[in-house]
Image (cartoon, rainbow, N blue to C red):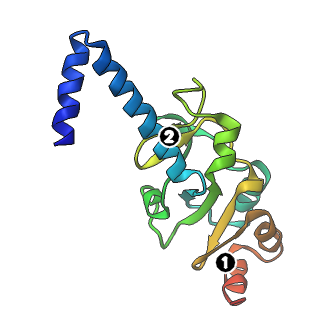
Amino acid sequence: PPAQKQRHAIGRARHGDMAALSKIAKEGVENLTDFLESLSDKFVYHSGSFKDAESIKSVSDKGLVPAEGQGGYGVYMARSPEGTYYHVGPEEATTFRAPLRPILEDYGLYKNTPSGVQYDAEELIIPGPVSPSLLEIKIGERYFPLQEVNEIVQKVGLPTAKQLIRNID
């Protein structure tokens, strides 16, 4: 089995087998490349309890800004909307999404850039703000550009804006 072969290669590398170490490193780079390619045209998601016009305006003005979290300082984003519901449930959440490619272009990846984006299978930690121009906000089952929605929210409030936008369909 592949897992057993990898364990053997790791064991040989620990004992100084440079060929085994080189193979493990190459596989790691290939896995990283596959990971990036799998996300390159994808979105990443962030949810929270943004409940009023003031909180939406703040995100529209400043973007998603870093905060201290369990994995360190950053903006925590998930690979799926469902992965964001750990502080607030889907019914209460306001969910944002952003394309991953420009975020990676802005910050780089942690292993290649010490201050870059950290990641694991489920989430990414962005080391700085996520630009408001990248953000879309989920209303109903669709996403809309945040800065356009913010104009409506500031005029009529968040609950009314959500209702108006849902009725567009």
* Image coordinates for residue 68, horizontal then vertical, percent: 53, 36
Is residue 65 among what the camera can see?
A: no
* Image coordinates for residue 31, horizontal then vertical, percent: 42, 39
Figure quadrant of the N terminus: top left
Mark 2 against mark 1, which lies toward the viewer?
2
Q: Residue at x 43, y 58 (%)?
A: 83
**Label 1 neighbour load within 10 Å: few <14, some 14-19, many 20+:** few
Determine whether, in the image, residue 53 is placed left or right of residue 15. Answer: right
Q: Residue at x 76, y 59 (%)?
A: 57
As drawn, 131 above or below 156: above
* Image coordinates for residue 139, horizontal then vertical, percent: 63, 75
Name the residue furthest front: 19
Is residue 68 among what the camera can see?
A: yes
Report the front residue among 15 and 76. 15
Query: In whole angstroms, how far apart are the C-alphas of marks 2 and 1?
Result: 42 Å
Q: Residue at x 74, y 64 (%)?
A: 146
Report which residue position mark 1 lands on: 159
Amino acid type at image mark 1: Pro
Q: Which mark is residue 33?
A: 2
Report the front residue among 6 and 88. 6
Marks 2 and 1, the one that precedes in the sequence: 2
Determine whether, in the image, residue 106 is placed left or right of residue 84. Answer: right
Q: Which mark is residue 54?
A: none
Determine whether, in the image, residue 156 is placed left or right of residue 82. Answer: right
Report the front residue among 96 and 118. 118
